[in-house]
Amino acid sequence: MRKNKAETDETIRKLIAVARQHFTDKGYAASALEEIGLEAELTRGALYHHFGNKKGLFQAVFESVQKEVAERVETEAARSDDVWEQLLLGCRAFVAAAVEERNKRVLLVDGPSVLGWDVWRMMDERNSMRLLREQLHSMNELGCFRPVPIDAMTHSLSGALNESALWIAQMPDGVQALEDGMTVISMLLDGFKKPGR
């Protein structure tokens, strides 16, 4: 029984990895399930069995990318013991990861259009926004902020980060655009600081 579960998990992992490469290189519309199955050495039937259809496979890839980005945010934020620096490092990690070539088409281009806005937002809330909310709640409990509704702050900051990523992804000089975007995010966050913090 365990062997079958392990084999199934490995099959799913392999399909997601191959599909991610196709969706990244060609985009959702130009990626064919037959080609993905052939490269993964699986039948089209296996793809349908595990994911239902092409959109189901894309959603699994999208969620995999989001989890990877969330892990990166956590890792980067943990580099500091200072809560403000953790917040800034996490914000930078999110934006930098979102605009990487291997992520941006899935996350920023095809994600919203293929999955629809509601699903895209729900998945964002489960991953990146969840981490942001946890950090902001912790900082609020430590008295870091002026009086502010944390849920409103979470959604506003998440929106700013997502919009920054969309803007940076279109800029010819992504490195400079990331720096400019983070300058603005940093200044925005400064406005929430309680005096003396």
Image (spheres, rainbow, N blue to C red):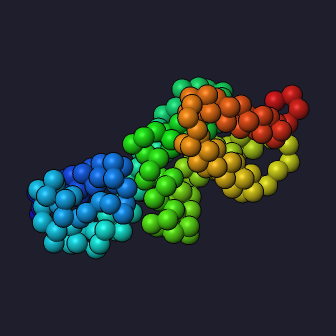
Q: Residue at x 42, y 40 (%)?
A: 101
Q: Residue 105: horizontal and vertical position, in percent?
A: 44, 50
Residue 60, compared with residue 134, is above or below; it is: below
Quadrant of image for the N terminus? bottom left
Does residue 161 appear anywhere in the picture?
no
Q: Is residue 98 left or right of residue 59?
A: right
Q: Residue at x 49, y 55 (%)?
A: 109
Does residue 175 appear anywhere in the picture?
yes
Q: Residue 131: horizontal and vertical position, in percent?
A: 57, 47
- Between 59 and 146, the residue placed more toward the observer is 59
The number of discs equals 0
Q: Is residue 14 left or right of residue 90?
A: left
Residue farthest to the front? 172
Q: Is residue 75 left or right of residue 21?
A: right
Q: Residue 29: horizontal and vertical position, in percent?
A: 36, 63
Q: Residue at x 64, y 49 (%)?
A: 163
Q: Residue 39: horizontal and vertical position, in percent?
A: 15, 53
Q: Which quadrant of the view contains residue 37?
A: bottom left
Quadrant of image for the C terminus? top right
Q: Is residue 68 left or right of residue 33?
A: right
- Between 31 and 15, the residue placed more toward the observer is 31
Residue 163, compared with residue 47, is above or below; it is: above
